[in-house]
Amino acid sequence: MRGWSWAPLLGLASGLLVTVVPLSGAQADDPVVRLGVRDHRFEPSELEVPAGVKFKLIVHNYDPSPEEFESVELRREKVVPGNDEVVVYIGPLKAGTYPFFGDFHQDTAQGRMTAKEPGAAPAVSK
């Protein structure tokens, strides 16, 4: 006679975990920030984002060749195929400035993201 096995319960438990994990991801009401890549440069090269809030960064590459959105400080890197876009979830961030770059064209694809607390003075354009 065979003994009792945990296998059916473990299978059921893992199935429940798979169901719960997607629910803890980004929400539809996350703020959206857009960034473009054109002629191997980020547009705009300076972004203002809310501090303390998770947001969705949509990076659209208008060039035919791929580019990689990368930031050591944000701990993010993602290849953006040519003439395509990708989504990168970021945050919540502490107030401050976070540089980013295009790994495939580091000489031209440079930018920075500034996370600001609500009510902080807006950046002055030059």
Image: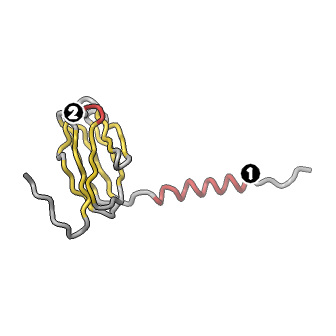
From the viewer's perspective, tell me whether residue 118 is left or right of residue 55.
left
Q: Amino acid at mark 2?
A: Asp
| Nearer-the-camera pick, 68 or 107 | 107
* Mark toward the start of the polypeptide (1 vs 2): 1
Q: Amino acid at mark 1?
A: Ala
Residue that mark 2 sits on: 107
- Compared to residue 75, the image places residue 64 above or below, namely above
Residue 59 in the image, given as x and y percentages of width and height: 27, 44
| Nearer-the-camera pick, 69 or 114 | 114
For image coordinates 69% across by 54% down, the residue present is 10
Give the image's coloring scheme: secondary structure
For image coordinates 36% across by 41% down, the residue present is 77
Residue 97 in the image, given as x and y percentages of width and height: 26, 54
Picture disc at residue 7:
1
Quarter of the image for residue 95 reads: bottom left
| Nearer-the-camera pick, 61 or 42 | 42
Q: Residues within 10 Å of mark 1 (few under 14, many from 20)?
A: few
